[in-house]
Amino acid sequence: MKSVIRIKDHEDGKLITISSFGRGKTFELIYGLAFILSAIYFAIEMGNSWDKNKGAVIFCFVFMIVFTIAAYRVLNKIAETEKLFINKERLDIITTRLLIFEKRSYVLAEISDFHFDDVETPRAPLEGDTVDYFGFQGDRKVIKDLFADGKASFLYRGRRVRFGKALASWEFNELEVLLYGMSGNDLRYTDEFERRNFPKN
């Protein structure tokens, strides 16, 4: 499977792009289109009921807003890209979406317990063992991806930071080796583990 991460050298570090587009996006595209069409349908129905039934207008307005928000969330997820900038001192996590740009910076020396923790969601009661006849598996995957915080995580100043929604486990291993090469520290261990197993003289 083709990697979703791209590494580019910079003078003072490396820029790693983690693109979520192109890996298992069929469900998201279908759901996004369905939500858009549903929002348009309720907008049209609201216009048709404007002078006839105020209750129907309110009903259509509420569902138009619901489907508009749902469509935005799906399209936002499809367009989302994460970039990591790494040098010997810090790790920057840069997230871009449709209308959002976010940058978070972390000192490498204070990062610990760096690991991959993708967890499978519980099976749906009616989900088949071989063929997903009712589509429950796809539905759960879409919902999980929409609200996921990230598959990779680390501890930083007492709190857990998550990123890498599109990362596969073998890509995380590649990223882990890169971080070790840049920082010279094994970021997998917690401070308590290092004090207990690697005491300083």
Image: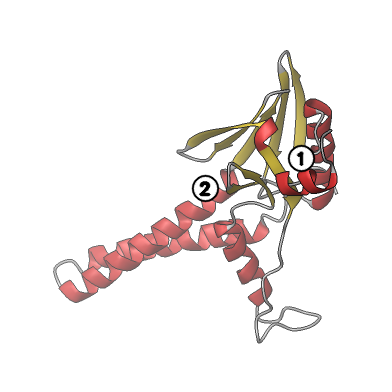
Q: Relative to residue 185, is residue 150 depicted above or below?
A: below
Mark 1 Cα shell of 10 Å, populated few (<14), some (14-19), many (≥20): many
Q: Name the residue tied to disc 2.
A: 76
Residue bearing the label numbered 1: 187
Q: Decide if residue 188 is in sight here.
A: no
Q: Position of residue 149 (x, y in %)?
A: 59, 53
State the image quarter where residue 141 is shown: bottom right
The amino acid pointed to by label 1 is: Leu
Q: For this rendering, which residue is in front, 201 or 4?
A: 201
| Residue 14 image position (x, y, % from top left) | 74, 24
Q: Residues within 10 Å of mark 2 (few under 14, many from 20)?
A: some
Of residue 182 and residue 47, the one placed in the foreground of this image is 182
Q: Does residue 44 appear left or right of residue 188 in this picture?
A: left
Q: Name the residue rendered at 80%, 40% in the picture.
A: 176
Three-letter amino acid code at the position of disc 2: Asn
Does residue 107 appear in this view? yes
User: Quadrant of the image for the C terminus?
Assistant: top right
Secondary structure of the residue carrying tag 1 is loop
Q: CA distance from mark 1 to mark 2?
A: 31 Å
In this rendered view, identify the residue nearer to me: 64 or 182. 182
Does 24 sit above or below residue 141? above
**Model colouring:** secondary structure
Which of the labelled discs sits on residue 82, or is there none? none
Q: Position of residue 26 (x, y in %)?
A: 67, 58
- Frontmost of labels 1 and 2 is 1
Taking the image as shown, residue 110 lies to the left or right of residue 74, namely right
At 59% across and 61% down in the image, what residue appears? 30
Along the line of sight, the residue nearer the viewer: 156 or 52: 156
For the point 45% across and 38% down, the residue is: 99
Q: Earlier in the sequence, mark 1 or mark 2?
A: 2
